[in-house]
Image (cartoon, grey):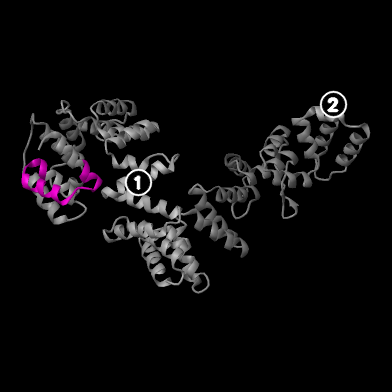
Amino acid sequence: MDEYTYVDLYDKIAFEVITKDELNKIENIDDICSWFLLSSHYYNMDKNKCYFYTNKLKQLNIKDSDNILICLTMGGIYDNTFFENLDCIETERCQEKSLEWYMKCLNNKSGFTEYYIANKYFYGKGISRNVDISINWYNKSIKKGYHMSMMFLSFIRNDKKLCIEAIKKGNLKAMVSYPYDDIYIHMKYLERAANIGYKPAMLQLAKQYIVYYDYFLAIKLLEQLRDIKFCLKETLYYLALCHEKIDNHNYELVLDYYKKSSDLGNSEAKIELCKYYRDTDLKSYFKLLDEASYENALACNILIYHYKHTKNYELVYHYALKGHELGDENCSFIVAKCYLFGVVVEKNKEKGINMLEKLKHDDSNLILAELYLTGDIIFNGEPVGLSFNINIEKAIYYMMSLTYENLLNFNIRYPLTKILLINNIYPESFSILDDDVKQNIIEIYLCSENIPIELQILIIKQLILVS
């Protein structure tokens, strides 16, 4: 076989879209290149056949060659860690040896070699990681027209045009990863890749069908993936979801799919199963939610909601901390409040405030606005006793960050803030107020119980200045 045929077959094996006829042709060649391709193909499908071809490779003792295909193959042998796992060849310094073999075939025409050298620099495999050098190698590969480099560099640079070039060259991964800004074109590429038999495209297309309520089309694709056991954890979950939407009475089938997906570790399936156990089996309900909470913040929030109502604050903090580690803002907000108020954990106002300031969502802005305005926070009707330094500028900043509803509530609790905000944003508005109105405002503010006297004096001074 020539270089272009070899690279094409290698890519088809990597994408798992190679046909039976193409496999038969490879088996009839019976040389080092075919053995490598076949061992790669059968690795996840047929361990016996994989051993058969890797043992043939193990018997070779090639030290050097000027044949491009042999150099590419030897580079690939040392580059693929599954040979090490199968104990088929000596793998000492395997990544370094792989690079040495790839460097021997830089006169290749396909750009295949440059792509794998670029990967080594990008991931730091057998060499120090250097993204700039890797991009240089990707560009060298692209000049020779290799679609895998186009695809990979388009991801690094978020380059839509380069992604399209990779698609034109037939890159299936680029078809699946095409930007979502044009859903019609994205769906067209997904369908094209799915029709070739690219399994990730089939799964992604099924998900898109679900989004657009085409459950029967989604089921058709998902059942094909189920039969070949592709990504069963997700496939079975989405099958359950589809059948739940179109057939409310077939609970046994839906539950069976959810259970199988759950058993494979799908946290979303565990949460869906909880709907069926909530009223009948509370032990299973909490067990599933606890299992899901290790990787799913929704499970953490459901458990937090329950334990808040039962006033089990130790478990509220426990699951909030889990959710915080998963990056969930609501859980982070609860952990911050625990430090701020000293609930379950030792009070640490600096840590709590630091967490709130990083969150930048409305509930945290509300607390920060109150804290910087009054120096304390009202919790369960009583001041917490934080004795925080008032900072009017920061109070205004966080008040201005609030949604209209929360700002309205804040102004009701602290009527002085309304005039403070107006004075900050529209100082000219005070100049048109009547003296009687100004006097009334001052009297109202001086009667405000929750506003520190220093702040009241500041407002009066501001009113005098603009009058």
Point out residue 148 in the picture as x, y percentages from the top left corner: 27, 36
Q: Is residue 356 left or right of residue 23?
A: right
Residue 257 position within the rendered picture, expressed as x and y whole percent measured from the top left: 38, 65
Q: Which sits in the foreground, 215 or 317?
A: 215
Which residue is more in the foreground, 207 or 464? 207
| 320 in relation to 76, above or below | below
- Is residue 217 visible in the rendered structure shown here? yes
Q: Residues within 10 Å of mark 1 (few under 14, many from 20)?
A: many
Element on which disc 2 rests:
helix
Q: Give the image quarter of residue 159.
A: top left
Q: Is residue 151 magenta?
A: no
Q: Which mark, by number, is residue 102? A: none
In the drawing, what numbered circle is on residue 466?
A: 2
Write the start and end of the magenta stretch as one range.
Answer: 11-34
Query: Upstream in the sequence, badge 1 or badge 2?
Result: 1
Tell me where residue 373 appears, x and y as whole percent: 74, 39
SS state under label 1: helix
Q: Tell me the mark number nearer the camera, choosing from 1 and 2.
A: 1
User: Which residue appears at 66% of the width and 38% of the height?
Assistant: 401
Q: Is residue 363 left or right of residue 60?
A: right
Q: Give residue 190's mark.
A: 1
Q: Position of residue 445 (x, y in %)?
A: 85, 40
